[in-house]
Amino acid sequence: MNDNVSSARSDLQGLRLVRAFLRIRDQRTRSELVEQAERLAAEEPAESGSNLPGSPGFAERPADPLS
C-alpha cells in the first residue's frame, strides 16, 4: 500500500511539474530549467528500472502514428 501511495504522489508531482513547465513561454527559461533539473537528477541515486531516456531501464517507444 505504501508503494502505491508513494507512486501516486510521485505521479502527481510529475504532472504538476509538466503543467508548470508548459506555462513557461520563454525558451531560454525553459532550457535553463531543463538543465537545472538534469543537474539535480544527476545528484540523486539512480532508480533501477527507470523509464526515463538515458536510464538503463528505458525502452525506446515508437513514434505515435497519430501525431
Image (tube, rainbow, N blue to C red):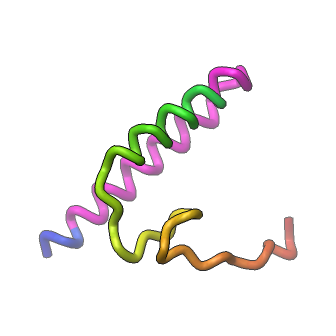
Q: Which segment is the magenta one?
A: 5-30
Q: In this picture, is 16 found above or below 50? A: above
**Percent of width and height locating residue 51:** 49, 70
The quarter of the picture where residue 53 lies is bottom right
Please indicate whether residue 13 sits to the left or right of residue 17 in the image. left
Which quarter of the rendering shows the N terminus?
Answer: bottom left
The single residue placed furthest to the left in the displayed view is 2
**Percent of width and height locating residue 14:** 43, 50
The quarter of the picture where residue 45 lies is bottom left
Please indicate whether residue 23 sits to the left or right of residue 9 in the image. right
Please indicate whether residue 31 sits to the left or right of residue 37 in the image. right
Residue, x 40% and y 76% (percent of image)?
49
Residue, x 56% and y 34% (percent of image)?
35
**Percent of width and height locating residue 50:** 43, 70
Q: In this picture, is 16 found above or below 4? A: above
**Percent of width and height locating residue 55:** 50, 67
Number of numbered callouts drawn? 0
Which quarter of the rendering shows the C terminus?
Answer: bottom right
Residue, x 73% and y 25% (percent of image)?
27
Residue, x 54% and y 44% (percent of image)?
18
Between 3 and 52, the one nearer to me in the picture = 52
Q: Main secondary structure of the magenta part?
A: helix
Between 52 and 67, the one nearer to me in the picture = 52
Question: Does residue 19 show up magenta in the picture?
Answer: yes
Between 55 and 27, the one nearer to me in the picture = 55
The quarter of the picture where residue 24 lies is top right
